[in-house]
Image (cartoon, rainbow, N blue to C red):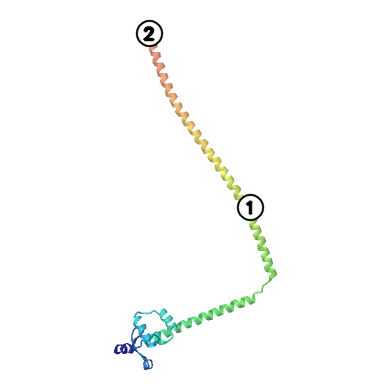
């Protein structure tokens, strides 16, 4: 019972963790031994014990807004004052933003009211756009046909070029073979001439000997 009374008298601030003293009005008629889940004082004590960590301003404001009772999230006077100032600043920012949105909405409504809608002008504009679209489609079709014709032409040129390349290679092979044959015939001719000179010399020698 004494341990429960000690825990009951002391609650820590959930932000700076300084010790808080509960007001006597919160201590009256509380069954400390029951540990009821709906007891706000016991819930505050449990919350402060389980959350021994620093809480940033964003989470702090979110928890405060979702709290049903001050005891759900105990704060010291200093942290409560700072939280109140932060919420006031956010409220002022939201009010300024709301005013800006209202001004923009008002301007848009005024512009819409001041601009007259001419159905005849709109129909004429649509007709001109449809006509322009048909002309562009016709030009596109002509360009596609021209592209196809040029592509076929290019393919024919490439085919002719390939044929010429093959013909050039064939002629080069033939020239190479003819050159080789000419070299072989020249060598054979030199060998024949050498044999003729040798036979002539032998003939002259035999003639002088006789």
Q: Are marks 2 and 1 in contact (CB under 8 Å)?
A: no
Among the 4 quarters of the image, the one containing residue 189 = top left
In percent of width and height, residue 185 lies at 44, 24
Residue shown at 53% from the left, 79% from the top? 100
Figure quadrant of the N terminus? bottom left
In percent of width and height, residue 70 lies at 41, 87
Q: Residues within 10 Å of mark 2 (few under 14, many from 20)?
A: few
Q: Report which residue position mark 1 lands on.
A: 142
User: What is the secondary structure assignment of the residue under circle 1?
Assistant: helix
Figure quadrant of the C terminus? top left
In percent of width and height, residue 96 lies at 51, 81
In percent of width and height, residue 144 lies at 61, 52
Q: Is residue 146 left or right of residue 197?
A: right
Q: Marks 2 and 1: which is nearer the front?
A: 1
Residue shown at 47% from the left, 83% from the top? 91
Q: Is residue 157 left or right of residue 14?
A: right
Q: Is residue 19 above or below residue 202?
A: below
Q: Residue furthest top?
A: 210
Marks 2 and 1, how far apart at CA: 97 Å
Q: Is residue 123 left or right of residue 39?
A: right
Q: Residue furthest front?
A: 34
Q: Report which residue position mark 2 lands on.
A: 208
Residue shown at 51% from the left, 36% from the top? 168
């Amino acid at each position: 019972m004494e341990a429960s009374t000690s825990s009951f008298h002391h609650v820590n601030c959930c932000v700076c963790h300084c010790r808080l003293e509960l007001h006597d009005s919160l201590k009256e008629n509380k069954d400390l031994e029951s540990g009821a889940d709906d007891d706000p004082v016991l819930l505050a004590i449990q919350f402060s014990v389980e959350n021994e960590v620093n809480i940033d301003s964003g989470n702090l404001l979110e928890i405060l807004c979702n709290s049903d009772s001050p005891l759900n999230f105990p704060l010291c006077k200093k942290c409560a004052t700072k939280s109140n100032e932060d919420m006031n600043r956010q409220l002022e920012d939201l009010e300024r933003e709301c005013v800006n949105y209202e001004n923009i909405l008002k301007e848009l409504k005024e512009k819409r009211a001041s601009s007259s809608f001419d159905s005849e002008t709109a129909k004429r504009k649509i007709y001109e756009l449809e006509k322009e679209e048909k002309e562009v489609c016709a030009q596109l079709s002509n360009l596609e046909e021209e592209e196809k014709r040029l592509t076929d032409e290019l393919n024919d040129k490439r085919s002719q070029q390939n044929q010429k390349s093959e013909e050039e290679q064939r002629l080069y092979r033939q020239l190479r073979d003819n050159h080789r044959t000419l070299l072989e015939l020249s060598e054979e001719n030199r060998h024949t001439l050498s044999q003729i000179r040798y036979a002539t010399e032998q003939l002259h020698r035999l003639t002088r000997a006789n």
